[in-house]
Amino acid sequence: MFNKIKLMIIAALVIASFGSCKKYLDATPIKGKVVPKTLADFEEFLNDILLSQSGYIYPEFMTDDVLFSSITTANANRQSKSYTWQKELLLSTEDDAEWNSPYNYIYVCNLVLDNLSSATQGTDQVRNRLKAEALTQRAYYQFTLANLYGKDYLAARASTDLSVPIMTRADLEAKAKRATVQEVYEQVINDLQTAISIPDFPDEGRNYIHPGKLASTALLARVYLFKGDYTNALKYANEVLAKKSTLFDWNVLKFSNPLKPSAATIPDMPLIQNNVENIFFKSAANPGIFVRFMASSDLLAILKENDLRYVFNFTRVLSTGLPSTSPNPDYLGNTPNFSIGVPEMMLIKAECLARSGDKDGAVAVLNTLRIKRFKPADYVALAASSAEDALAQVLAERRRELLFRGIRWFELKRLNRDDRFKKTLSRTVAGDTYTLEPNSNRYVLQIAPKIIDLNPSILPNPR
């Protein structure tokens, strides 16, 4: 059985080997290193807390939800380059953790999947559960990479648009080429459907690091929504909601000292891992860089001050009790929760109903959610005059509810397909105005020059 130190040694070898393109099994032996053989050994790889992280954070700087006064130049660092949508985000000498980390996590999943059939000392039930967990995690990171570095799914071009390499074996010397958008979606959907079909995969994971079948199903609903397959998105969202529909009531929240509000003074705000709404837990990678900003004016146009999601995310009063001098409300500093949760499943259901013409059904779902987001005296039920009106209300609610959930950047790409919802983004830094047009090449992130130097078969994204 691995202990944590031994696991860390092997994990370090995996990561170091990935970066240098050496074979993992050819790494120089370290005294005391354990060679994994049993099912318990391979389960230790899936116990790694790193697998509870999203693997990305910088796209949050790129959305239309934020306003940074602390960014005063366009090219100082990755944050400022992201905020101003620079064509080149990385220098030739820089690594890209948002590419490397998900592929490292995929490698760990593949290492487990490659060896489960020959692993000893365990039951088939455990073997099957580990397979389902590894497939689910692999699908999550593959889909994340596709949304960051590949084009969005459009049926007419999905078979030719480039996405990211698909890695399904733990081969550190593989010189994989970029797959098409269609191939990545097919791989992700196949992994998730395979995981869901495994009888020994429980609905709920053993803890927040380990996903269960509901997590696989919820991710599948998200994937189908972004694919534009609303029939299947609705199917899988309903399957999740039939088994888990618990909502957190924001009415229980209050500031312990309302005169000096901060994230630390909201005692009943649940920790991410304890949020009853979570289905597939993911914390934001490197959240410490995503602080000290304001709500954008564009966001404030739809997020009203009596909405509890405003009250407990933004403030015009400093933690010292003094009035803020910021032009827009300051972010309180809550830790971003990138998990897939019950509200997202409800919003997927509502969107699919609206797109199918069921305006009343869509709005009913929104009202079930919104009643938990307003004080009773402030709550007003929504109504829709048409299916198109209902759809617009659903998309606005997605923006409010999924605020800082790691999905808005992907959402902007998705909505750019539709003339009704595409938008030009704009912001000013040091007197210069920067814009991002709908369907711009900059919606597809730069692949690091270092990655392309290591593997020239990976074609760069057009800038």
Image (tube, rainbow, N blue to C red):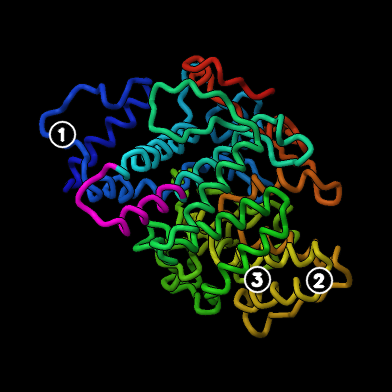
Mark 1, Cα crowd under 10 Å, few <14 / some 14-19 / many 20+, is few
**Figure check: 143 above or below 347:** above
Mark with earlier residue (2, 3)? 3
Where residue 416 appears, x then y in whole percent?
77, 44
Residue span colored magenta? 118-135
379 displayed left or right of 205: right
The residue where tag 2 is placed is 358
Residue at the image position 46 percent from the left and 53 percent from the top: 282
Q: Nearer the viewer, mark 3 or mark 1?
A: 1
The residue where tag 3 is placed is 307
Asked if the residues shown at circle 3 and circle 1 are in contact, with their CB atoms under 8 angstroms apart, the answer is no
Quadrant where the C terminus is found in the figure:
top right
Residue 33 circle label: 1
**Amino acid residing under circle 3:** Asp
Q: Nearer the viewer, residue 75 or 325?
A: 75
Q: Is residue 132 magenta?
A: yes
**Amino acid residing under circle 1:** Lys
What is the distance, in whole Å, between disc 3 and disc 1 at their CAs?
Answer: 54 Å
Q: Is residue 392 magenta?
A: no
> In terms of secondary structure, where does tag 2 sit?
loop
Mark with earlier residue (3, 1)? 1
Residue 68 circle label: none
Where residue 1 appears, x then y in whole percent?
16, 48
Residue at the image position 76 percent from the left and 41 percent from the top: 155
Residue at the image position 86 percent from the left and 46 percent from the top: 419
